[in-house]
Image: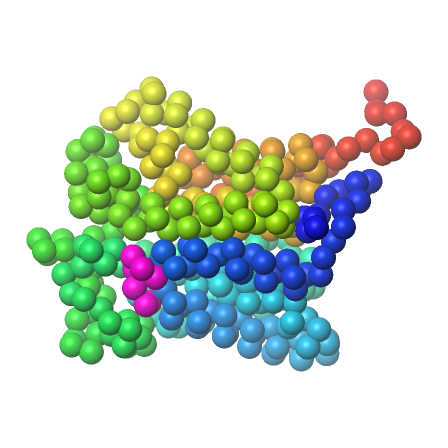
């Protein structure tokens, strides 16, 4: 059964929104498990917080608008938005970061635009960008992978760290993020960006333990998990393969050209695929049927634009991951993309 939506005059069998949302949530499970395994219970706690407050915000705003609460809550769209926010927020970020992001995504980005189907931007990514710009310290305080930690963090220590900023033993977020040399560790994308700014080459930078033996400790497996979930969605025809394939191909092409021209200052193509939120973006963010392009040519253009923006921001911008910023900018271009890529109306000639 086909779930994805295409522009007229093509007609696809459409399942209920709730079935599609549940399928996407199920597909995210491998990536969430990988994130839990490498970055601890904080990721699960953040996801639970985000889903809880996203649903509460949805109920509150629907009540204010005098809408049918049960019908719209059971479509699981708020749950999916909360899930994506929880995945995107650092696992040791304070609890109020997740709460603010979840409420903003639902009440401002989704409901103020009219609810599901009317939002111009992807709610989860709009909330992420708002948080990143407003609270850059908290939103860039990612925990290193468990194997790089100097202090083991249990479930209760993760919970206490999120609620109070300290573990039960009194270790702060910054102490948790330090390695054995007393240097605060960042994500692979942040580390590479900083090292290049300091004049190091890519080869010198990747000797940092955060990169591990391959590309990025933990993150490569998280991306692999979301890749498996994405393949599942394509197999179930819940998403159109055109967007993720076009995005990953374009990102590979742009990074390959840059790496070929300047390997000392440009990361490899596989690094860009397996670091940060690349696979989450490719299969779970860009494919949002509301904020993405609807025509076949438009989807290729939209995905390629996001890939170009991701590479430019990662290479030259101040926010290394770049997925959220690239998606929001491309969301604004979707009406124009659709305008110039829409299929000719059946029975009519094209304009001369």
User: Relative to 257, does residue 338 appear above or below in the rendering?
Assistant: below
Q: Position of residue 252 (x, y in %)?
A: 43, 30
| Magenta segment main secondary structure | helix
168 in the magenta segment:
no
Q: Position of residue 64 (x, y in %)?
A: 67, 79
Specify start and end residues of the magenta stretch as a single range. 36-42
- Colour scheme in use: rainbow
Q: Quadrant of the C terminus?
A: top right
Evaluate whether residue 263 shows in this view: yes
Residue at 72%, 43% (x, y): give it: 6
Residue at 19%, 63% (x, y): give it: 176
Nearer-the-camera pick, 182 or 285: 285
Horizontal side of 291 relative to 104 (left or right) equals right
Q: Determine the residue located farthest toward the left in the rendered image.
A: 181
Horizontal side of 154 relative to 307 (left or right) equals left
User: Relative to 260, does residue 219 appear above or below in the rendering?
Assistant: below
Residue at 89%, 29% (x, y): give it: 348
Horizontal side of 171 relative to 145 (left or right) equals left
User: Relative to 38, does residue 263 appear above or below in the rendering?
Assistant: above
Q: Position of residue 68 (x, y in %)?
A: 73, 76
Q: Place residue 196 in its image quadrant.
A: top left
Residue at 41%, 59% (x, y): give it: 32
Q: Position of residue 75 (x, y in %)?
A: 65, 67
């Amino acid at each position: 059964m086909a779930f994805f939506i295409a522009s007229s005059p093509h007609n696809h069998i459409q399942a209920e929104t709730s079935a599609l949302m549940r399928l996407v949530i199920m597909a995210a499970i491998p990536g969430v498990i990988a994130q839990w395994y490498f970055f601890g219970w904080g990721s699960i706690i953040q996801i639970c917080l985000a889903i809880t407050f996203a649903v509460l915000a949805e109920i509150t705003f629907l009540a204010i608008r005098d809408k049918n609460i049960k019908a719209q809550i059971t479509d699981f769209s708020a749950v999916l938005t909360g899930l994506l926010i929880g995945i995107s927020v650092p696992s040791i970020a304070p609890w109020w970061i997740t709460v603010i992001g979840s409420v903003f995504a639902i009440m401002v980005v989704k409901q103020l635009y009219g609810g599901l189907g009317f939002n111009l931007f992807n709610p989860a990514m709009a909330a992420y960008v708002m948080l990143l710009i407003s609270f850059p310290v908290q939103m860039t305080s990612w925990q290193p992978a468990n194997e790089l930690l100097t202090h083991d963090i249990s479930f209760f220590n993760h919970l206490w760290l999120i609620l109070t900023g300290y573990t039960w033993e009194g270790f702060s977020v910054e102490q948790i993020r330090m390695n054995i040399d007393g240097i605060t560790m960042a994500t692979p994308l942040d580390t590479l960006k900083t090292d290049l700014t300091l004049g190091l080459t890519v080869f010198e930078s990747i000797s940092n333990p955060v990169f591990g033996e391959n590309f990025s400790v933990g993150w490569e497996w998280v991306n692999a998990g979301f890749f498996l979930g994405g393949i599942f969605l394509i197999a179930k025809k819940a998403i159109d393969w055109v967007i993720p394939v076009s995005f990953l191909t374009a990102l590979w092409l742009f990074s390959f050209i840059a790496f070929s021209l300047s390997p000392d200052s440009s990361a490899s193509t596989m690094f860009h695929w397996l670091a940060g939120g690349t696979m989450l973006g490719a299969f779970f963010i860009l494919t949002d049927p509301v904020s993405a392009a609807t025509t076949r040519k438009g989807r290729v253009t939209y995905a390629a634009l996001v890939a170009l923006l991701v590479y430019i921001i990662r290479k030259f911008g101040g926010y290394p991951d770049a997925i959220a910023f690239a998606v929001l900018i491309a969301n604004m271009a979707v009406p124009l993309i659709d305008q110039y890529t829409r299929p000719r109306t059946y029975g009519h000639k094209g304009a001369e």
